[in-house]
Image (spheres, rainbow, N blue to C red):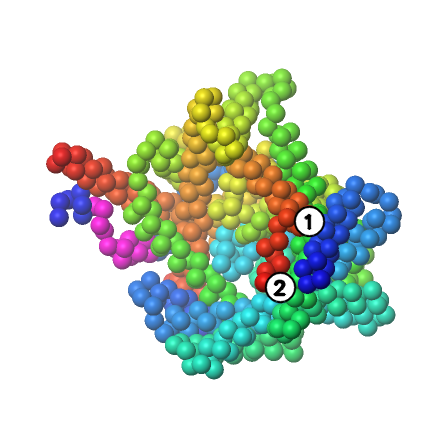
Amino acid sequence: MSPNPWIWIAAFLTLGIFSFLFKDNPVYRFSEHLFVGVANGYYIALYWHNTLRPNLVEPLAQGQFIYFVPLLLGLMYFAKFIPRISWLVRVPIGFMIGWGAGISIPANFQARILRQIEGTVVTPASFANPWQGIWAAVIFIGVVATVIYFYFSREHKGILKPVSRLGMIFIMIGFGASFGYTVMARVSLLIGRIQFLLGPWLGLIK
Amino acid sequence: MKWFEKLTRIDRRVIYVLLTAFVILPLFIPFKIPENVMPQTRRLFDFIESIPVRDKAVIISFDYSPSTQPECHPMAIALLRHCFKKRIPVIGISYEPQGPGLAVDALTLVSREMNIDAASRSDSVIYGEDYVYLGWKSGRVAAMLEMGESIARVYPVDYFQNPIDSLLLMRKVRNYKEIAIAIIVAAATYPDEWVMYPQARYGIKVAAGLTAVMAPEYYPFLQTGQFSGMLSGMKGAAEYEKLILEHGYTNKPGRAETGMNSQSIIHLLIIIFIVIGNVGYFFARRNKGLQR
Amino acid sequence: MKRTLPLAVCLIMGVLMIVQFFVPHPVSLQFNSTILNWVIVLSAFALVLAIGNLIVYHGNRIRRRQPGWIYSIVTLAGMTLMAGIGLVWGVDPDSLFQKIFLHVLTPLGATMFALLAYYMASAAYRSFRARSLEATLLLLAAFVVMIGFMPFGQYLGRWFPSFAEWIMLVPNMASKRGIQFGVAFGAIATALKIILGIERSWLGGKD
């Protein structure tokens, strides 16, 4: 067993959260609320040391007065808590949303549409290796079928019906694969916690 | 209650106990099944192998939190062991707010491990020369983009408040031109943003270490070459640990590899649960049909 | 004014950032760099809203002695203590801040998500039924991936891991790419609607 009090604290909190599997109880609720509090305290210290001080306070102190603009916009966030001027909070939100929307349009086109179309198109070069060429054709058909499945502006009649059904089959296989990976992910998290309890805490495994 | 009805009504506590037991058992009865290494893991390994010593640096973005630590932390540690042993400079950053604590843990662990074994200063891993940790920054897309022009403008100080110009490594690495690859160890959609923004604008190579939940979504990026490699979940971490062990970059087996035995057993157990549930369901449906 | 000004700011920023992407002139690059540095700072202020809401919510629970108000004290005390320790004593590898992160925050966060393994197993057993062709395909794909990617999968047949990998690289990738196209076009359409002021839900409120 570990003589380190910090390990014991970690073990107690781990078991406190696991106790929820039996039923809700005061130890679990204490642990849950402690998590929320400590996480937010962590964020406060992080935001100050990593962004506000080096990227705002120190440039202002060095005379870079242009930083008064983001400071002013940032202070407008506080207006949310003053009912008379709470509408001012929309200004920095509008700034951020407009900026984000603006940069996302060319980025989405370039990385998620054009490059992905490039990867989907089948050319004679794809058949340099015959099997690779066949799978490239299957991928092409699968992508088209999936897109058609999600096309709801028209009723799926005629040619659209079998193609969208094919799309559904591809989607189901994709979701099955995702579920398989999800099982791996969730189980990994449990294994990690068990390894901690049996290893560093109880010293039963290396 | 008929037998097939019982099959569909197993108490959840039985499932919980069996799950726990079969996670614990393989940890006490270790057995070795050789890991098969997936092509995308090998692709990342080979890419790092191809980076000349002390030439360009590697960015490792520690973008995971304690909730995904068992999958991502072993990946980060394995990558650090590989880069440090190959004398590839590492620049650590984070955009996930809870990333820095784990990043500091990984960097401290691996650098101390290497320095204990070091015979001389040239074998040692020195902070500021061989690696730096710049910390977390808000407005991550803005930070990613601005780093393409000047890393120092985004990070005037590192995580430990050292001025960036005081760090020897950061005098040589000014922006993405001096970066060989950015490896994003993430539990959220940060790799998307690396591909959409810095890669689209500056052409930086990107690879990802992802949780298993996210991995299936990123195969399109792998196929187009937008990712230069990918580690998927605890399995990906175990594969990378195996590769660096085989190539002599470490003599320590990793945490992920020891967890794969439990992983294998639990996968079988869950398949058995699902099959049992379906057998009960089909017989119940048939019985209902017969009764009509 | 209360709605016009924010909408105008949104429109101007959106259009400028789209135009900036295509203009490599030094003035455009300098403008972009300045805006990026402002965004880095401004993003940090968003924490104010989150912390403010947390304090108001838990403060009200304590003031009104609502059920479970004791736990709200735990939350606020934990937040104050952690923030104070980090702000005063710093964040070095050997600091108290780092120790609390590793031995309090990490086990709590990790264990919360470890519970999902149990819920997932229970839910899979209870509701994963091969009711139709599509559901059966989903199940079979899941089984192949779950077995194929585990080390023992190769003992069922040397082709088994390759088959699992094929499922990921061909049908899975095709469907994910199709979904990605939909998401990308949707994101572009939403971004345009926001910039042009057609989508105004972010304004909130009545005035």
Q: Secondary structure at mark 1?
A: helix
Q: Earlier in the sequence, mark 2 or mark 1?
A: 1
Q: What count of labels does the image hold? A: 2
Q: Amino acid at mark 2?
A: Asp
Picture layout, residue A197 above or below residue C131? below
Q: Residue at x 44, y 55 (%)?
A: A189
Quarter of the image where the C terminus of chain C is located? bottom right
Is residue A126 highlighted in magenta?
no
Residue C207's label in the rendered image is 2
Residue under the point 68% across and 49% down:
C195
Magenta stretch, overall SS: helix
Give x and y (percent) for residue C16.
77, 49
Q: Position of residue B167 (x, y in %)?
A: 77, 61
- Residue that carries the numbered disc 1 in the rendered image: C195
In the rendered image, the quadrant that contains the N terminus of chain C is: bottom right
Q: Position of residue C102 (x, y in %)?
A: 53, 67
> What's the amino acid at mark 1?
Ile
Q: Nearer the viewer, residue B5 or C51?
A: C51
Magenta highlight range: B7-20
Where residue C151 appears, x then y in whole percent?
42, 40
Q: Position of B201 compared to B64: left or right?
A: right
Q: Is residue A82 visible?
A: yes
In 3D space, how far apart are the residues under numbered discs 2 and 1 (Cα atoms)?
A: 20 Å
Q: Horizontally, is B149 left or right of C94 in the view? A: right
Count residues near mark 1 (Cα–Cα under 10 Å), then give few for <14, some for 14-19, many for 20+.
many
